[in-house]
Amino acid sequence: MRKREHSYHAFDYVLVGAGPSAMGFLCGIIELHQGKEQTAAKNFSICVIERGNLPPCNRDPKKWFQDSYSLSSCCSSLVKATLPASRDTVIPTGKGLGGGSNINACVVMLPSANDFESWPSPWRESLLSYTQNLQTKMNENKGLCHFKTSIAHNIPQDEEQRIRNQSQIHFETRFPSFITEVPLSISKKEDGKYRRVNYYESLVKPYLNEASPVKITWLHGIQVERLLFDVKDESRVVGVECQEDFGSWMKIRANLEVILASGAIETPALLIVSGIGPELQSAPCRKNLPVGYNLQDHIMLPRPMFHLPWTSGELSPNSVQAIFNAKDSNDRFQLLLFDAASYPHLLPHFVASQFRRRAPNRWPPFAQSIFQYVVMIFFHLVWLLLHVLLSCTPIYFILRYCVVSSGISLVTTKSRGCVKVLRDKQQYQVPCRRSQCQVVVEKCYLTDDRDYDGLFHAMKIFDKLCQPWYRQALFEILPGKWTRLFFRNERDWFRWYSSNFSLPYFHWGGSCGMERVVDRYLRVKGITGLRVCDASVMPTLPSVPTALTCAGLGYGLARIIFEEKDNQNQTMKIQEKAKP
């Protein structure tokens, strides 16, 4: 075997990943250097390593689901995951400059102050203001658009007040009116069409210029394979080993720190293959930490309704017409209204995915393999048939004017999953690399019975609140009233419904949580020269899409590092003055 040849580079900070948290970090660093105290950390050199490339411009936000799940997409890669009722699926992870903001639904909602009650300082007090600052910057850079829903439904004020009093629910939006403005990371072109604006374009690109004191080196199309440790001190990270798309290798040294910002799935995978994680998965294990565990996600139940044709006017840019938040003493809920903007891509995948089931474990391995092969063929045939029907027949226009879907979401889930790294036994005896392993997500949804109760409670609440609107529907497409006839009671029916039709909300976090894997300053416990800054460090998930909160984490980390560097400089000046 030919020996690998490496090229070597050195920077002050090595930033692995270019998602929202990385963009928030760079935005914060640039802003601090442009301030009055720029001497505190002057002339930083930062290397940003991203496995993807810059996505093409002028992308249609209506195709966000296609960008997420297409095998030929340059914006995402797919990871296997398990769902309730023996269902298999794949979940997308973003790549390219902007990361997850290249494939999400473009929703940019501010978190609530209550979302951070269980977070340690300084995040509990400051993270909300960081996200507000970033949202303001996005608006200034024309990367934010407020879409006002066109689904109208009026309830008399006295009726609305009566519903509020009876349910004892706190509403963060004036709920029953179905009129709200959804902030989206999009811009409107001169021809009236919308285009996606990712976090790189709205938070970093406008501030890059030759006069900037921050030296940023961008490395695209490069996969970080593992972390590199100091030969004399195995608890100190000194850099990363990378592989380029065309097969060449390089080692990049971090003079100060390596910052992992690859997301709640890729970051724990990289830590585990580098020997930081559970002993059973990390070999050789350098530090035994619960990396990959405590993975969380919001969960959603779809509920499409068939209405008489409604003249809605403009479709939403991303299929999301409105978002409403509510909470009671124990849980937080969310209701989303979807129109047909993304149906040609979303609907075939959802229907076909119901056939992706796992073979029983008692079957022999060869029978399981045959079963999975047949299931995948059937999945692709169903997907292709539905895609053709929606693209080439009048069915889409029926859906466009007669079907409105609601999604009931529980955003305070109790179920916890894990990120696992699968590799051959022989790979446990040698240093492992990320490209040699398969990553899977397990047991993240409805493994705790309290989540069934929470979803059931949410459905009851929204049934009462939306009753006048539901009356206008001719019939319920899913789950359908007829399905209740096969069950003894409503609880058993709802358990079947949620187990078989619940969907991921794509808001993963918590797999390297604060006070478990990292400290409050995002330093990995027991390891020097290494921090984690992405959704994986969240102790609990916010009640809104996580991209803006991730950017706020990076924005706050920039301030932490800046203050640490400033304190070091002041200490050095004091020591120099104290010398005789």
Image: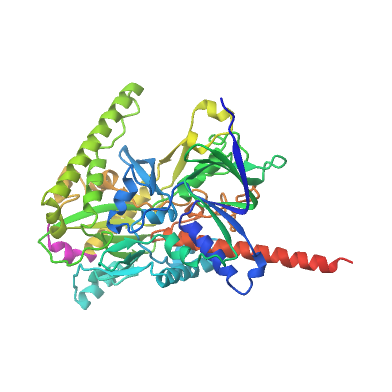
Q: Quadrant of the N terminus?
A: top right
Q: In the picture provided, is 507 more to the left or to the right than 214?
A: left
- Main SS of the magenta part reads helix
* Towards the viewer: 238 or 85: 238
Q: Quadrant of the C terminus?
A: bottom right
| The stretch drawn in magenta includes residue 507 | no
Q: Is residue 443 above or below residue 187?
A: above
Q: Quadrant of residue 579?
A: bottom right
Residue drawn 38% across the image and 65% down it: 109
Residue drawn 22% across the image and 54% down it: 303
* Towards the viewer: 567 or 207: 207
Q: The magenta stretch spans which residues?
A: 465-474
Residue 121 seen in render: no
Residue drawn 41% across the image and 67% down it: 110
Q: Is residue 172 above or below residue 426?
A: below
Q: In the picture provided, is 477 more to the left or to the right than 62?
A: left
Q: Is residue 179 above or below residue 107?
A: below
Task: Point out the residue furthest to the right here.
Answer: 580
